[in-house]
Image (cartoon, rainbow, N blue to C red):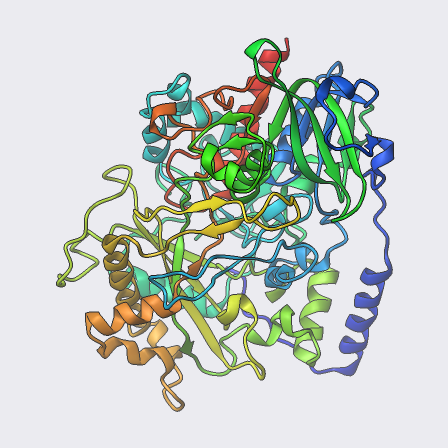
Amino acid sequence: MPSHPQTSTHAFIAASAAALILYATLRSRRTRLIDSPKAVARRVDDTSSKAEDDRASPQYDVVVIGGGTAGCVLAARLSEEAHCRVLLLEAGGSSRDVLVSRMPIAFPGNMHTDADYNLWTEPQVNAEGAKKYWPRGKLLGGCSSINAMMFHTCAPSDYDEWARMGQEGASGWAYKNILPYFRKFEKYVPRSDLPPLNPSERGMNGPVQVGFFAYFSIASAKWLQSCINAGIPVKRDVNTTSGTAVTYVNSSGERVNAETAYLTPEVLKRPNLKVSINSQVTRIIFSTHGGNKRAVGVEFAKQKGGPRYRVRVRREVVLSAGAVHSPHILMLSGVGPKEHLATHGVPLVHDLPGVGQKLQDHPAVAALIPVKSGHSLTHVNATKGWGSLQGLAAYAKWKLFGSGALTSNIGEVAAFMRTTDPKIFPQDSYHVVDNSSGPNAPDIETILLPLDYSNHGHPPSPPRSLVTPLVTLLRPQSRGTITLKSNDPFDAPVIDPRYLSSPNDMAILVRGLRHLVRISEIEPFASLLDRDGPPLDLSLRGLSDADLEAQVRLRIETLYHPASSCRMAKLEDGGVVDGFLRVYGIENLRVADASIFPTIPSGHTSAPVLAVGEKASDMIKQSLR
């Protein structure tokens, strides 16, 4: 593993770093992205006009709504067919010029900016009535441009569970059928100083580069060894049958996201592909002639109160706006629960009760552990700037050599476990129900973040020498909703994940929180603890179950993985799409993003969404031929 960086205090290093920052700020990265609606669409002054009155609008074979993780895949793959005219509509801009998107450790710096929708949940009844912050990427690449870059394909049984849902096409989602799509997008790049992985279990030629190029701190290395000493088996690669987390950090030390991987300069030169940025979709337009309901167009705008623009669609509209915005756009367009749409004055196109229902998320609970000076990366936390010589030197090392602490993805080491395993979790007063997808699938994950990640990576000043272990519930029983706040497309939807509405979720998180503190007291990590100051969350080890439940209610936050709000399931089971991702009751309309997951997978959701994008592209290509 890379060694801990030795930061220099020489003034010339600081001056060099300052010059590099100025250069990066001033440098322009021009692309063929379109920021003028008139270049791709027709302005409409009467937004109440019907589809048949819209013949003057430009027409495309496929319109992809949302240039996020799956949307970039779809635009690139579908435009491989030279005869297929593709339009990609993205509400935000490009990630290429966003420094805190490109720099791995800086991803919290994207939050509460123009690159983030800056969403908040409803007050959580079981979490002290608090509203919870939900960052969602508002730029090309979507959440793959602002996340922690953890490449994880989740448990095989997660997909076999999907295949048992029973709707038409469900069997196509079994692990054996989706595995080729993981391999298709992956480009594993080995490191010369580390033992290679088995190439037969890796994708080697895809557009998305993954590997072990992210920084690995001393704190993470010692935490990993403490986990091993606690009886947790170690696997270098959690994405293989024999399977440290593999990351979306390339050999140059920069983030790999869906935009940089799929919307390359060569792809953007295709004459049959247009990518329109700063284009927020306001609704999908339908034709209802002869009782058949078809998606025939899309309406969008640049900003609230601005003019609306329309395009026509000849073959398919693909909704890839994510687990929050895909159901939101469907409901704004008149597709969703009939009574709910009527409440907000949205004309009904199709009554589909499952839209926005069965929302799932991975909730997380964190602890703050004090460590000795020099063993936390808080000093290079980009959300506080790089005002120190240490921070400037770290920036220079990253910019010049693509290495050092700034290549950390923050989530440096992860452990996947089953809380029903008596070898790891001591007996307690809880009766935990196994909600995993299979006997070899986890229900909990712990991650060590080698800095102060309080307030989603925006800790108070001055920063302290802290690390943040957290526990994540991978298979929650709690279910939430996405609903309309109003019929205004620029009003954020109402998000209610209903955290901890299941007692089983609470029991698992209490076990996990107790486990975090126990690991921190095991060598060799225990030697890093700073026992001279306030103990902070080391004091949790003596609390009762009831006291720990109170801490879970106080601390619970999202791990940024909302899913399942437009589920792929039988219509009678609340499904929104079938196994071919076609929206029930509507022709020429599909959904392809995390919202279609029948159940949330037991791990990080970026890789499954990329695979959905790849598989959906093949489905659509087949239908176009």
Any part of residue 354 in sight = yes
Q: Quadrant of residue 285?
A: top right
| Residue 603 percent coordinates (x, y) | 40, 46
**Residue at the spot 37% in from the left edge and 70% down from the top edge:** 554
| Residue 348 percent coordinates (x, y) | 55, 29
| Residue 146 percent coordinates (x, y) | 61, 53
**Residue at the spot 62% in from the left edge and 50% down from the top edge:** 491
**Residue at the spot 27% in from the left edge and 59% down from the top edge:** 506
Q: Quadrant of residue 429?
A: bottom left
| Residue 609 percent coordinates (x, y) | 52, 37
Closest to the observer: 383 or 231?
383
Quarter of the image for the C terminus: give it: top right
Most extreme residue toward the bottom, as rendered? Answer: 532
Closest to the observer: 365 or 444?
365
10 displayed left or right of 358: right
51 displayed left or right of 318: right
Any part of residue 404 in sight = no
Q: Is residue 37 above or below residue 447?
A: above
23 displayed left or right of 571: right
Q: Is residue 201 above or below residue 500?
A: above
**Residue at the spot 47% in from the left edge and 77% down from the top edge:** 466
Q: Quadrant of residue 369?
A: bottom left
Q: Is residue 613 above or below residue 461?
A: above
Closest to the observer: 456 or 66?
66
Disc count in the image? 0
